Amino acid sequence: QVQLAESGGGLVEAGGSLRLSCAASGNIFRINAMGWYRQGTGKQRELVASTTTSGDTTNYADSVKGRFTISRDNAKNTVYLQMNSLKPEDTAVYYCFASRPLPWGNYWGQGTQVTVSS
């Protein structure tokens, strides 16, 4: 099993910044990607950003490109999401995930609330 501990959510005004952290522990063998999804009230869960543990590939949702940056510290088994120029529509619960090849699959954090006031 892989455990994911998230931190860094909170309330911020529009235009502000937050940084989310997600630390992986447990059986981290062969984690090949980590990242963040989010789910707003009444909305489907969507991929926000992801990165391979090798760092050679990152992906962002179109809605966050140029504002959010994902980074990782492999020595700490931690991934970060720096969120700048936040908008009210970024309000959601943000879930960290870690991926391992099959048969293991994906693991999820408990979620952290991000609220952006207008």
Image (tube, helix red, strand yellow):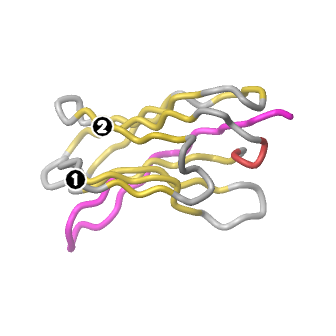
Which x, y percent locates residue 70? 41, 42
Element on which disc 1 rests? loop
Q: Is residue 7 above or below residue 52?
A: above
Nearer the observer, 113 or 51: 51
**Front tag of 1 and 2:** 1
**Location of residue 74 (image quadrant):** top left
Seen as rendered, the residue at the extreme bottom is: 103
Name the amino acid type tagged 1.
Answer: Asp
Q: Quadrant of the C terminus?
A: top right
Q: Classify residue 94 as left or right of residue 21.
A: right
Mark 1 or 2, nearer chain start:
1
Name the amino acid type tagged 2.
Answer: Arg
Q: Classify residue 43 as left or right of residue 45.
A: right
Nearer the observer, 71 or 24: 71
Q: Is residue 114 above or below residue 61?
A: above
Distance in Å between CA atoms under marks 1 and 2: 11 Å
Q: Which residue bears the numbered disc 1?
A: 56
Element on which disc 2 rests? strand
Which x, y percent locates residue 44? 66, 67
Q: Which residue is drawn at the image coordinates 40% and 35% (left, top)?
A: 80
Q: Which residue is drawn at the image coordinates 14% and 55% (left, top)?
A: 30
Which region is colored magenta? 98-118
Q: Which residue is drawn at the image coordinates 66% and 28% (left, top)?
A: 10
Residue 112: in magenta span: yes
Q: Which residue bears the numbered disc 2?
A: 72
- CB under 8 Å between discs 1 and 2: no
